[in-house]
Amino acid sequence: MFQAKLTPTIYPFLFLSALSLTAHNCAQAQALQDNQWHGGISIGGAYASSNTSTQTFNVIANGSKASKEDKLGVYTLINYGSNKVNGVKTNTAQLFRLGGRYDYNLSPDSFFFGGSEVETNKIQNVDSRYAVNAGAGYKAIKTEETSFDLFTGVGYSETRFGVTIPPSVANKKGVEFLLGEESTHKISPTSSVKQRWVIFPGNANIGNRSTFDINLATVVANGWTLNAGASISYSSKPSNNFKKTTSLVTFGFGYKY
């Protein structure tokens, strides 16, 4: 497993690259409406030991169950890292994110949704965060070659921080809007890409948030895959003057079902 930080200049390139994939000729990328679970999981990690020891571990997983009437989707991201020097252990990553969304089709091209997400990111001083939201979406592309959805809505979120230093607050909560897009593409007979970008404009108390996730999976044999992914999150009002942007790049081995 390899893990690295991204510079802000890479963000527009990543997003434009993801959108450009919708123009490629693909196959079987649309969610199967067979009322069965489909998705994938990727696991990566590394361990090194000498005068110092380091270990990292990450899991990225998603799944969906779709019919002609509705769709249920879930996703999770786990990232853990530590470093030990002279017997003193320091955590370098402690991220857990779990979310889901239920879509009810209003027509062949539109849907209503309700979703929620929970997260903890100790290294960024986020002790816990939860968000619930609801809205409507439009299926801009829904062929066998690719799927591309746009959605918007309104929600509520609350973030509780760990150690805070005034004037930073111990928690923040309030109403926030959301604007997002997500797509799935099959770029070759064995490779597929999933990406999702959501912006959460909030009130003056909670500020603005944004998350962007992209994952490439290549089947090597019998559903087993090699995976590469990137996850970027932004918060306009972090606690204690922490960095506003965090990023993660992963490579791992997984399974697609």
Image: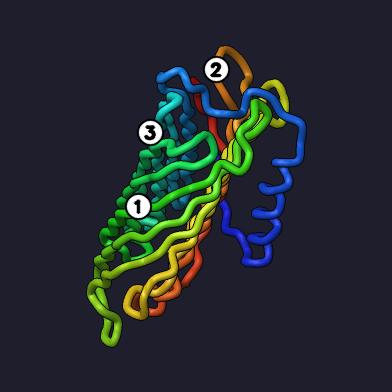
How far apart marks 2 and 3 lie (CA) works out to 22 Å
- Name the disc covering residue 134, or none: 1
Q: CA distance from mark 2 to mark 1?
A: 34 Å
**Which residue is rendered at x = 34% and y = 75% of the image?**
239
Total numbered circles: 3
Earlier sequence position, callout 2 versus callout 3: 3
Q: Which residue is mark 3?
A: 72
Q: Position of residue 52 (x, y in %)?
A: 44, 52
Amino acid at circle 1: Ala
Element class at badge 3: strand
Please give the residue where the numbered disc 2 appears in the rendered image: 223
Relative to 117, say whether 11 is above or below.
Answer: below
Q: Nearer the viewer, mark 2 or mark 1?
A: 1
Query: Mark 2 or 1 closer to N-term?
Result: 1
Q: State which quadrant residue 222 falls in.
A: top right
Residue at the top extreme, as displayed: 222
Tag 3: amino acid: Leu
